[in-house]
Image (cartoon, helix red, strand yellow):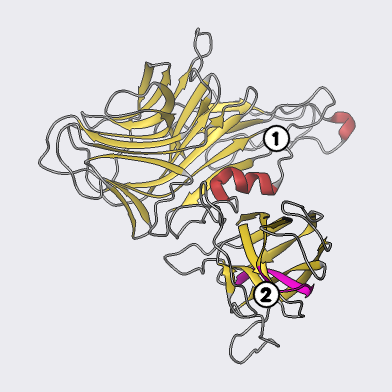
Amino acid sequence: MAISIKGGATSNLAAVDANLNLAINPPMNVSLSGFLVAAGEVTDGVAGAAILRRPTDISPDYRLRAGSDQTLWFDVFNHGQFNNGKYVGVDATMTKSLAGGFLNINSGADVTTAHVTRVQTWRTFCVPESGALYFDMHLAFAQLPIANTVCEFGLGFASGVTAPTDGNFFRLNASGVLQGIVNNNGTETAVTLTGFTYSQNVVYHFLMVVHIDRVEFWINDRMYGAISMVGQATLTSMSLNLPLLIRLYNTATNATAQQMKIASWGITQADIVTNRLWATTQAGQGLSAINNPDGVASGYTANAANSAAPATGTPSNTAAGYTTLGGQWQIAAPTGAETDLIMFGYQVPAGAAGAPGKNLIVRGIHIETFNTVVAVATTPTIFQWGLAVGGSGLSLGVVADNAATGVRQHRRVVLGSQYLPIGAVVGQQANSLDINLDAPIICEAGTYFCVTLKVPVGTNTSTEIFRGVCFVNGYFE
């Protein structure tokens, strides 16, 4: 029986829309209004995991709680050099490579049983008590699921072809089934990610949301499964401090080789305001200026040979005594002059389509100088230090910018001076320079960062050697 809804003695009737949904218009008068409870829909349940809605959260001070995210790691594999400064790479006959904008796992198409390759970060990432970690990866599979090949990617500890000892990760198992895995100290809980199938060589966005008692597994913005450890004796991992991990291995010899192609991956800390400095974030991503940036051979940037004195540099106005980003130095005592010498002349690697051009951000400089071999004779020695930054070429002799030829001269910064008096004995140290740059200095990709030295007062003495160290406090971005 049809029933009309109307307002008491009035003729006002309630309406429905074309889908037979009751039209509701809450009161505009505050004194007449009631309450509406807000909730957010995490997943609609149409495909993948069941429908999931969560209420909004209000603090005791009646404020809506909102999350604040912090990038902890983000890497794009758009270059050709594996960076050992950031990653552990272990190949057991199976190989990896960087090419075509991907980190290619099993790039040699190995099909032999027990062969494996693995990449993980040196750094670990902590799962917070009241927040979450987001693991993101853009990944393609070269083949449809292949029996006897295991692909794992996420967070965890693993070695060889044995099961991981701790972690949370996706697994395409030896039966060709895609799963979400929670591994606590070697004990695994798995959920099959039903409803997802992939196409070959198509990049998909895989996401894990990791809490200490729950892990959600998402693909292309849809949740396909979740594992809850609420009410159980264990958490989502034993350590709760895990490295990024990707691994591929064969459990038997196959006719066809599976390969994984990673375009990018990252870690984001969610829902906790850490007030972490940007410099700290960049250093935490392996982008400290002590490491070579992505796109060039892995290694450290300073002139610092193990258990050896530095080679004697011969800096000039056009050539660097050392092509490193600071480190140890030594020079023969020069004749006093107004010539600017390039003690360290470092070129920030240039950017291109296949090379991620990073900018060098310098936050401070520390310089120490001391006398060696013989005492300072005849005249005192004054060292005047500076920076020459951002030049398109190394030479300090460029006198002007040139808009027609793309030439830019160095921007110059005076750091300070040091003094060694007449009679300064072997081992005597000049005053230290410790420069903090509240306004950082930027040196763009492809340009030069030079630490310069002028010796306005001094006497050339062939047997006298001045020596010291220079530390450049900075990071790449």
Residue 447, percent from left and from top: 59, 72
Q: Quadrant of the N terminus?
A: top right
The three-letter amino acid code for the residue at tag 2 is Leu
Q: Quadrant of the C terminus?
A: bottom right
Q: Which residues are magenta?
A: 447-462
By secondary structure, the bulk of the magenta-drawn segment is best described as: strand
Q: Is residue 345 visible?
A: yes
Q: How many marks?
A: 2
Depicted 91 relative to depicted 403: above or below: above
In the image shown, does 180 or 3 lie closer to the viewer? 180
Q: Secondary structure at mark 1?
A: loop
- For residue 45, side relative to residue 256 (left or right): right
Residue 246, percent from left and from top: 37, 38
Tag 2 residue: 341
Tag 1 residue: 13
Residue 393, percent from left and from top: 59, 79
Q: Inspect the magenta stretch and tell me whether residue 434 lies in it.
A: no
- Write the residue at 54% across / 61% down: 311
Asked where in the image residue 328 lies, by quadrant, the reply is bottom right
